[in-house]
């Protein structure tokens, strides 16, 4: 009995022993803070313990802030300002002719050199022969020649070939309650979209309200590029879906220009391969569709001045598709040969109205024949 009572007593102690407290609940670790990778953190000033503080990125509203609109300079006087750049690349022609004509004896070999110099400068065969014939006659009459007289002869003859009497006015002002409409055409790679953007910039600098039509729907990069040009100067850009109908985009751009009382609507078309008849027909369609809404005041053909006589063939094919009213010569500051100005005008009877003299946004200038010839001949 004693043993049984002892066992029961020990068991009771274990049975009624007070229980210990349970383990505390496990807390979930805090979620890691993921930094906004769109804007890198900026290191702030050093704190008292030698560390640096981190500046928080700007709020999302600032990230989406529209670009600041630029105020371009006016187009007047641009070619005079760019004359030095032009003369650096073109003085081979001018100085070469001056040197040849200044020789004491002008025999047939010298005249052949003069003719070769002009043809090499892309003046063209027919204009070259006309110039050489005229110069030979004047030299015979003049007899002895001073450097100033030679320069005067060349300047007079070059100006005559460039035809300073051609109307080079660019029609960009609204009329009859509708904006002026400019259609920009040309082969891929000539700088057509860039020229469109630079022209819009120049017109905004002259105080015009401009609407741009991105009718090159087959090349997304062209549309985005034109949008960038428009955003920089506050010009509205009308664009369509990639691969969409260019004529529809052109029509909408003109409608937008009328609605917003714009001064000028500039339509950038797709770069046409002059060997593709179908694309040329489509260019004619774009022009016809625009004319349902407004008059097409200018059709500007953009030519790369460095392509020389190949550019002449492009010009002739485009002139058959649409009525070209003016030429914009790009890259005239590089390796271009200035004689292309003479040959393209002589072949088409269309004036060069704009020249690109560099890669800067304000390097598109109205063409001035006298400034151009002075740049050819140097000071």
Image (tube, rainbow, N blue to C red):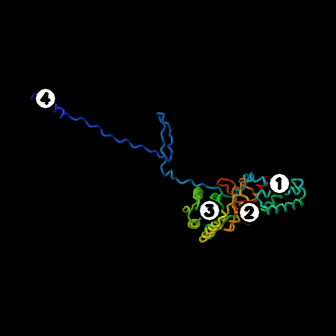
Picture quadrant where residue 280 is located:
bottom right
Q: Secondary structure at mark 2?
A: helix
Q: Which mark is residue 270?
A: 3
* Position of residue 125 measured from the top left corner of the image (x, y, whole percent): 79, 62
Kindly report the distance in space between the C-alpha atoms of the residues bearing marks 4 and 1: 137 Å
Q: Nearer the viewer, mark 3 or mark 1?
A: 3
* Callouts 2 and 4 close, C-beta under 8 Å: no
Question: Who comes first in sequence, dot 4 or dot 1?
Answer: 4
Kindly report the distance in space between the C-alpha atoms of the residues bearing marks 2 and 1: 24 Å
Kindly report the distance in space between the C-alpha atoms of the residues bearing marks 2 and 4: 127 Å
Question: Who comes first in sequence, dot 3 or dot 1?
Answer: 1
* Callouts 2 and 1 close, C-beta under 8 Å: no
Q: Which mark is residue 6?
A: 4
Kindly report the distance in space between the C-alpha atoms of the residues bearing marks 2 and 3: 22 Å
Q: Nearer the viewer, residue 341 or 264?
A: 341
* Position of residue 306 measured from the top left corner of the image (x, y, whole percent): 71, 56
In-image side of 133 versus 241 (left or right):
right
Which residue sits at x=57%, y=61%? 237
Q: Nearer the viewer, mark 2 or mark 4?
A: 4
Badge 1 is on which residue?
A: 98
* Position of residue 76 measured from the top left corner of the image (x, y, whole percent): 69, 58
Q: Nearer the viewer, mark 2 or mark 1?
A: 2
Question: Who comes first in sequence, dot 3 or dot 4?
Answer: 4
Give neighbour class at mark 3: few <14, some 14-19, many 20+ (Cα, 10 Å). many
Badge 2 is on which residue?
A: 344
Which residue sits at x=30%, y=38%? 24
């Amino acid at each position: 009995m004693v043993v049984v009572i002892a066992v029961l007593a020990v068991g009771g102690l274990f049975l009624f022993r007070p229980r210990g407290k349970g383990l505390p609940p496990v807390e979930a670790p805090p979620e890691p803070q993921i930094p906004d990778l769109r804007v890198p953190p900026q290191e702030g000033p050093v704190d008292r313990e030698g560390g640096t503080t981190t500046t928080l990125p700007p709020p999302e509203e600032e990230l989406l802030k529209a670009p600041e609109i630029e105020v371009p300079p006016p187009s007047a006087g641009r070619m005079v300002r760019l004359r030095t750049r032009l003369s650096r690349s073109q003085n081979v022609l001018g100085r070469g002719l001056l040197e040849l004509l200044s020789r004491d004896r002008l025999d047939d070999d010298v005249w052949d050199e003069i003719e070769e110099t002009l043809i090499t400068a892309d003046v063209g065969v027919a204009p070259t022969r006309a110039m050489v014939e005229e110069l030979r006659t004047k030299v015979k009459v003049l007899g002895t020649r001073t450097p100033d007289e030679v320069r005067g002869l060349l300047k007079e003859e070059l100006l005559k070939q460039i035809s300073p009497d051609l109307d080079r006015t660019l029609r960009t002002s609204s009329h009859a309650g509708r904006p002026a409409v400019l259609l920009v055409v040309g082969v891929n790679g000539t700088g057509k979209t860039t020229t469109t953007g630079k022209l819009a910039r120049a017109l905004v600098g002259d105080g015009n309200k401009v609407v741009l039509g991105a009718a090159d729907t087959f090349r997304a990069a062209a549309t985005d590029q034109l949008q960038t040009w428009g955003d920089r100067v506050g010009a509205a850009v009308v664009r369509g879906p990639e691969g969409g109908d260019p004529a529809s985009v052109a029509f909408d751009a003109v409608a937008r220009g009328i609605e917003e009382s714009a001064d000028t609507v500039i339509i950038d078309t797709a770069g046409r391969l002059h060997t593709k008849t179908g694309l040329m027909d489509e260019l004619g369609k774009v022009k016809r569709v625009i004319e349902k809404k407004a008059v097409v005041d200018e059709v500007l053909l953009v030519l790369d001045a460095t392509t020389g006589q190949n550019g002449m063939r492009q010009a002739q094919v485009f002139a058959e598709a649409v009525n070209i009213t003016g030429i914009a010569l790009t890259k005239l500051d590089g390796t271009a040969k200035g004689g292309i100005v003479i040959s393209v005008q002589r072949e088409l009877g269309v004036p060069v109205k704009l020249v690109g003299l560099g890669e800067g946004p304000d390097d598109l200038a109205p063409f001035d024949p006298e400034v151009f010839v002075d740049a050819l001949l140097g000071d």
